[in-house]
Image (cartoon, rainbow, N blue to C red):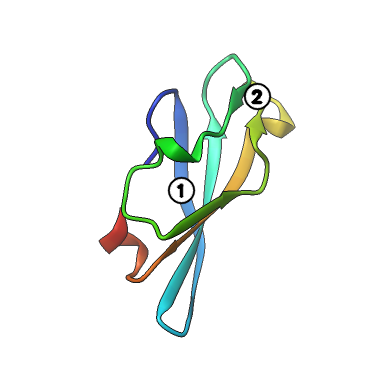
Amino acid sequence: LYRGWRIETAPIGAWKSGALYVTAVRFTNQSDRAQDIDLQELRGRWLAATAQHGRVLAAGTDAAVTTVYLVCDRPFEACK
């Protein structure tokens, strides 16, 4: 789902509003370095994306996790 560095992703929630689907995806940094979230590196056909935090700290810290919200006109599996 994300290119460029060691990140574990997992959908944690989804909902539909009208014709759009929103999926919340947990991003967990697996690297020993802090990383900025670059939404241009997302794989898939998303209409919109936003990150709760723009940076995650090194693996093992409380701040190594953030949530990214993805919007698509189809369910998550069809857009990724």
Q: Position of residue 2 (x, y in %)?
A: 40, 36
Q: Residue at x 26, y 62 (%)?
A: 78
Q: Residue 55: give x, y in percent of width and height.
A: 65, 31
Sequence-earlier tag: 1 or 2: 1
Q: Nearer the viewer, residue 38 or 65?
A: 38
Q: Residues within 10 Å of mark 2 (few under 14, many from 20)?
A: few
How many numbered marks, from 0 up? 2
Amino acid found under the numbered disc labelled 1: Ala
Q: In the displayed orientation, state which residue is furthest to the top.
A: 32
Question: Which residue is nearer to you in this view: 7 or 2?
Answer: 2
Please tell me whether residue 78 is drawn above or below residue 5 in the rendered image.
below
User: Which residue is the site of mark 1?
Assistant: 10
In the rendered structure, which amino acid carries the disc numbered 2? Gly
Q: Is residue 52 left or right of residue 9?
A: right
10 relative to 71, above or below: above
Compare residues 23 and 13 and report the one nearer the observer: 23
State the residue at coordinates (73%, 33%): 62
- Check disc 1 and report its element: helix, strand or loop: strand
* Residue placed under numbered mark 2 in the picture: 60
